[in-house]
Amino acid sequence: MTDTPSLAAALAAQLPHAEGRIAPPRLAADGTVSVILDVTGLDEMGRGILENDVRRVLGGIEGVREVRVVQTAEKHERRLIAVGSGKGGVGKSTLSANLAIALKRLGLKAGLVDADIYGPSQPRLMAAEGERPTAESKQLNPIETKWGVPMLSMGQLVGPDKALAWRGPMASGALGQLVDARWGETDTLVVDLPPGTGDVQLSMIQKHRPTGAVIVSTPQDLALIDATRAIDLFNTAGIPILGLVENMSGYACPHCGEVSDPFGQGGAEAAAERLGIPFLGRVPLDIAIRLASDAGEPPAAGDGDTAAPFLRIAEQLVEALNKRQR
């Protein structure tokens, strides 16, 4: 006679690889068997294979009239790191791309969202121009880059020369599609925000609640004033500031080696101390970084001198994240 223990024993004997994923089946008087599958971490093909195997085993048992399967998955906790600036032109996108790669090199499962809806540049920086994401069940599938960091950008969904004349709600909706995509096992999303403190930033804060924010500024006073506004936005919304990065910090002449400071020196570090937030590090004004970035070869992916600042910043960021979890 068919009973619940014998059904469970049949599943355990024939599907030992699925141990822990199959809850004890429930048998109704009419011969209907209900079973719940834990499909956490499985892709669509893996989920389908598991369900088919369970249906095959249970459906082949005498007395079973119908098999009903329910798939469940644990909600995957994913950290969102918002990278912002008070104004454009401070190297925020370059920092975001290299930060995502550096976090990947440190062992995190990092992904990258280009949320700069009106001026997406990550496809160029990550050598993913011309690649278009696919979709499943109304969710986008991120592009797999050659650096091992999956990414999504509005620049992959519209032509490179198309202007996006969108009002706030449309831009906010686009951000939601990028963030709520099928990120799989990605545990940390670096979100490259547009400059300023507008609709996209507000949507990110209200709907997606970043784990924290990284603010990028150059050392000059004007950039720091704008960076302070971005910091105030996140502080007001209760989003922790994980740190401040000083970009374009010092220029070493490639001919004589003399170091000059066209944008000033140490302003961001001093501002971080004054505001009581962590200072994550400096990135120099280096033509090698600019050339590599324009060529879709992020310096953080290599082992040269240009990679070192990004790796140090990533290490400081991971330390700041760990402190918040303690």
Image (cartoon, rainbow, N blue to C red):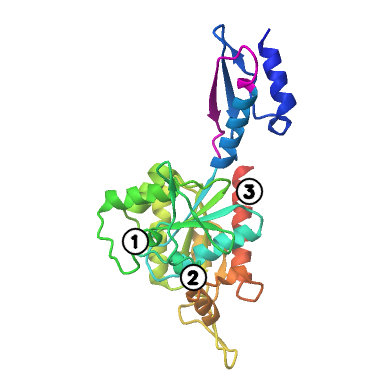
Q: Is residue 24 visible in the rendered structure shown here? A: yes
Quadrant position of the N terminus in the picture: top right
Amino acid, disc 3: Asn
Q: Residue at x 64, y 42 (%)?
A: 326
Q: Which residues are magenta?
A: 58-76
Quarter holding residue 231: bottom left
N-terminal of the pair, mark 1 or mark 3, is 1
**Marks 2 and 1, how far apart at CA:** 38 Å
Q: Which residue is mark 2?
A: 267
**Marks 2 and 3, how far apart at CA:** 27 Å
**Marks 1 and 3, how far apart at CA:** 37 Å
Q: Secondary structure at mark 3?
A: helix
Quarter holding residue 312: bottom right
Disc 2 vs disc 1: Cβ atoms closer than 8 Å?
no
Question: Which of 246/171 is in front?
Answer: 171
Q: Which residue is mark 3?
A: 322
Question: Which of 155/236 is in front?
Answer: 155
Disc 1 vs disc 3: Cβ atoms closer than 8 Å?
no
